[in-house]
Image (cartoon, rainbow, N blue to C red):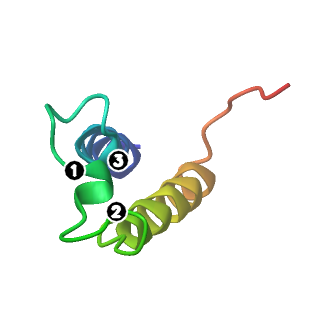
Amino acid sequence: MAVYHMGKLMFAQHSELVNKSMNKKLSPNLSFNNPSIDFHLKGVDITMAAYMSELGFLSNTAVNHV
């Protein structure tokens, strides 16, 4: 459970960094040149979402989804 909560915290912080409305005027997806071509951290964002899903499964959290 502790690893799940640490992962959840890291995922939330990373999501705030990548989200352009919350990262205090950094470029979208923290791209280097053209945001429509370069997605440097989008792959990391997708990977972190997948890891959070696995951590949630492995920690056996009981959550209800509609």
Counting residues from the start of the chain, the first of labels 2 and 1 encountered is 1
Identify the image quadrant of the C terminus: top right
Q: Is residue 7 above or below residue 50?
A: above
Of the numbered discs in the image, which one, if any, rests on residue 27? 1
Q: How many marks?
A: 3
Task: Tell me which residue sits at (15%, 36%) in the image.
Answer: 25
Counting residues from the start of the chain, the first of labels 1 and 3 encountered is 3
Task: Tell me which residue sits at (34%, 62%) in the image.
Answer: 35
Identify the image quadrant of the N terminus: top left
Residue 16 x, y percent position in the rendering: 28, 37
Q: For the residue carrying disc 3, how many other residues have a C-alpha within 10 Å: few (<14), some (14-19), or many (20+)?
A: some
Disc 1 marks a residue whose amino acid type is: Ser
Residue 23 x, y percent position in the rendering: 19, 36
Disc 1, disc 3: CB below 8 Å? no
Q: How far apart are the two marked residues, 1 and 3, measured between alpha carbons?
A: 19 Å
Label 3: state its secondary structure. helix
Residue 49 x, y percent position in the rendering: 50, 56
Disc 3 marks a residue whose amino acid type is: Phe
Looking at the image, which is closer to me, 47 or 8? Answer: 47
Q: How far apart are the two marked residues, 2 and 3, measured between alpha carbons?
A: 22 Å
Residue 30 is left or right of residue 28, and the answer is left
Residue under label 3, please give it: 11
Disc 2, disc 1: CB below 8 Å? yes
Counting residues from the start of the chain, the first of labels 2 and 3 encountered is 3
Looking at the image, which is closer to me, 43 or 1? Answer: 43
Task: Tell me which residue sits at (15%, 44%) in the image.
Answer: 26
Q: For the residue carrying disc 2, how many other residues have a C-alpha within 10 Å: few (<14), some (14-19), or many (20+)?
A: few
Residue 64 is left or right of residue 48, and the answer is right
Of the numbered discs in the image, which one, if any, rests on residue 35? 2
Of the numbered discs in the image, which one, if any, rests on residue 63? none
Disc 2 marks a residue whose amino acid type is: Pro
